Image: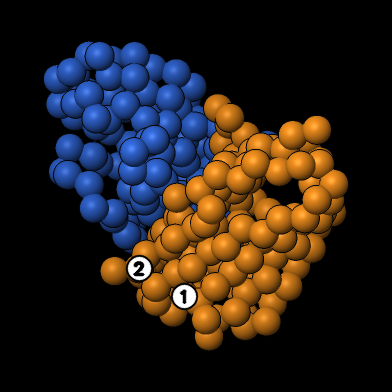
């Protein structure tokens, strides 16, 4: 059974500093996703990572994938208050019909 | 292009009742998936539909069912509601199952009393 673990579960950040969220998964997957969720809102797609060594960046967020280690990281550079949200990673396996298996989420709070 | 829409947005039911939730995917999208989000269990996959056929089903009891219509709109039904069914139900659409990104709707928040 595919399992996805994120850590930390909660991250209190100071504005201007850098932080990393980790996502480990238990079996080979085809795609790794990062989503953002604001309180009471739906999921917003941030990145899709398809291959080993893939790196994608958008603004202060950068995601990378190491398929050999079954590890993805979401790096936040110079945190700002607007980045406060819960971040989820998810993986899917095409053979399993594209169902997403989500990590437990990392709640991020950026303090001034 | 309009996003994924879900109706109703909020719903209050009592134990034992049944409920039907609706999802309209992005125009042209034919793949629809449903997820349940609760504080305790997190985000869990319910079902995936493509071209009116269920392609995959998560580990939920038979009280949870779904269907997809020829216009790609999807409904999910929960019968004999239990308190534990209180959750945010999210629908997501893709153009085709092989495509990379799913687009999520705003969700239906169900409260079972």
Q: Are marks 1 and 2 on the same chain?
A: yes
On what subunit does the disc labeled 2 rest?
A
Q: Badge 2: how crowded within 10 Å, few (<14), some, or many (20+)?
A: few
Q: Which residue is mark 1?
A: A29
* Lateral position of residue A58 relative to residue B38, left or right: right
Residue pictured at 56% horizontal, 67% vertical: A32
Residue B100 in percent (x, y) is at: 59, 65
Question: Could you say which quadrant of the image residue A12 lies in?
Answer: top right
* Frontmost residue, B105 versus A5: A5
Mark 2 highlights which residue?
A2
Tell me, yes or no, if residue A37 can be seen here: yes
Q: Where is residue A108 drawn, in percent x and y? A: 63, 42
Q: Quadrant of residue B16?
A: top left
| Residue A62 sits above or below residue B48 on the image | below
Q: Chain of mark 1?
A: A
**The chain coloured orange in the image:** A
Question: What secondary structure is found at the residue carrying circle 1?
Answer: loop
At a point 28% along the width and 24% down the height, the residue shown is B19
Residue at figure coordinates x 28%, y 54% from the top left:
B58
Crowding at mark 1 (Cα within 10 Å: few <14, some 14-19, many 20+): some
Image disc number at residue B42: none
**Is B30 on the left or on the right of B13, as rendered?**
right
Is B79 located above or below residue A8 in the figure? Answer: above
Residue A52 image position (x, y, % from top left):
62, 83
Chain drawn in blue: B
The quadrant of the rendering that contains the N terminus of chain B is top right
| As drawn, B60 above or below B57 | above
Which badge, 1 or 2, is on the more N-terminal residue? 2
Q: Is residue A107 above or below residue A28?
A: above
- CB atoms of marks 1 and 2 within 8 Å: yes
């Amino acid at each position: 059974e595919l399992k996805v673990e994120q850590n930390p579960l909660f991250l209190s950040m100071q504005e201007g500093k850098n932080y990393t969220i980790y996502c480990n998964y238990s079996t080979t997957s085809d795609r790794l996703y990062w989503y953002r969720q604001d309180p009471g809102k739906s999921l917003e797609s941030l990145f899709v990572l398809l291959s080993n060594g893939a790196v994608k960046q958008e603004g202060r967020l950068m995601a990378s994938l190491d398929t050999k280690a079954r590890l993805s990281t979401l790096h936040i550079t110079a945190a700002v208050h607007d980045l406060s949200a819960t971040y989820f990673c998810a993986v899917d396996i095409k053979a399993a019909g594209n169902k997403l298996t989500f990590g437990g989420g990392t709640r991020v709070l950026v303090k001034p | 292009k309009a996003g994924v829409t879900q109706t109703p947005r909020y719903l209050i039911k009592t134990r034992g009742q049944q409920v039907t939730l609706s999802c309209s995917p992005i125009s042209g999208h034919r793949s629809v998936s449903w997820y349940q989000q609760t504080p305790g269990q997190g985000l869990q996959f319910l079902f995936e539909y493509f071209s009116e056929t269920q392609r995959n089903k998560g580990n939920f009891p038979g009280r949870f069912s779904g269907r997809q219509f020829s216009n790609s709109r999807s409904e999910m039904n929960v019968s004999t509601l239990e308190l534990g069914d209180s959750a945010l139900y999210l629908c997501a659409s893709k153009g085709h199952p092989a495509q990379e990104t799913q687009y999520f709707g705003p969700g239906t928040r169900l409260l079972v009393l």
